[in-house]
Amino acid sequence: MREIVLDTETTGLDPAKGDRVVEIGCIELINHLPTGEEFHVYINPERDVPTQAYEIHGLSEKFLSGHPIFSAVADTFLAFVGDDPLIIHNAAFDLEFLNVELVACGRPKISENRAIDTLILARRKFPGAPASLDALCRRLGIDFSAREKHGALLDSQLLAKIYLELIGGHQHDLVLGGENKVAMNAEEETPPTKSDQTSPPSLASVRSPRPHAPRAEELTAHEEMLALLETPLWNQ
């Protein structure tokens, strides 16, 4: 299963007031784990970067002016994300900005139905607790010491770890004996027939035991180890 963790940085909070996307970072997940495939680009917003935004992400107008505009990277971005689910923290914010940019350059919008919002997941899992990336990293024991400022790629890397923990960690799909439990429940619900009561159990899957007697060198090593102990329990 392929998923894309996505984050953006912008010049402000409202695309309707002219704010633009200045950075996109994406991480590819297969079965919820990063593959190493990434998409990262800085974008020239063709406008100034307000001081408040600069203090958050550290991307200046001068720096961004040397990078491509959104329309130049739109197709590469869309090809990377494909049609796969998007893992986004506060998805409505990022998708609103991206869709304004996409429509402006004649590309299709990204459906909100594709988004898995980790902000919603976090609030369900930890009701009433802070749900920012920093707060979730602290709560989940994820190292975010490199996050001096916001950055789309770094934040996506952190969010990939947060997402994995929110859905249950590395073993979220592990159900010991799940199939056997289903089979046992089915047997309990279905009364045995006459043929079930009279038929002998099948031994087709039973294997004869394999010999595993110790070798001579193993016995010698064992005796040497016991000789090193004052009162080995083995001899009692």
Image (tube, helix red, strand yellow):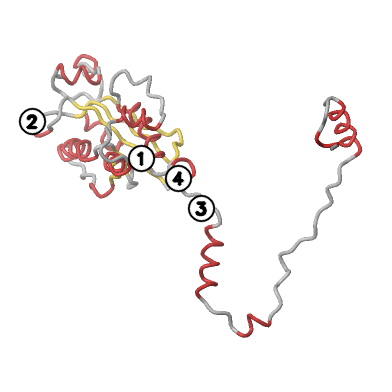
Q: Which residue is the site of mark 3?
A: 175
Residue at figure coordinates x 35%, y 40% from the top left: 4
| Picture layout, residue 188 above or below residue 18 | below
Whole-number angstrom distance, CA of label 4 to CA of label 1: 11 Å
Whole-number angstrom distance, CA of label 3 to CA of label 4: 16 Å
First in sequence: mark 1 vs mark 2: 1
Residue at figure coordinates x 28%, y 48% from the top left: 114
First in sequence: mark 4 vs mark 1: 1
Q: How crowded is mark 1: few (under 14 residues within 10 Å), some or many (20 or more)?
A: many
When asked about the image quadrant of residue 194, the answer is bottom right
Q: Which residue is the site of mark 2?
A: 17
Which x, y percent locates residue 180? 56, 62
When asked about the image quadrant of residue 125, the answer is top left
Question: Residue 31: which disc?
Answer: 4
Q: Which amino acid does label 4 sit on?
A: Asn
The C terminus, quarter of image: top right
User: Viewer-proximal residue, 11 or 183?
Assistant: 183
Mark in front: 3 vs 4: 3
Question: SS for tag 2?
Answer: helix
Question: Residue 4: which disc?
Answer: 1
Mark in front: 1 vs 3: 3
User: Do the residues under discs 4 and 2 have CB atoms within 8 angstroms?
Assistant: no
First in sequence: mark 3 vs mark 2: 2
First in sequence: mark 1 vs mark 3: 1
Q: What residue type is labelled 1?
A: Ile
When asked about the image quadrant of residue 76, the answer is top left
Q: How crowded is mark 2: few (under 14 residues within 10 Å), some or many (20 or more)?
A: few
Which x, y percent locates residue 65? 21, 18
First in sequence: mark 4 vs mark 2: 2
Whole-number angstrom distance, CA of label 4 to CA of label 2: 39 Å
Question: SS for tag 3?
Answer: loop
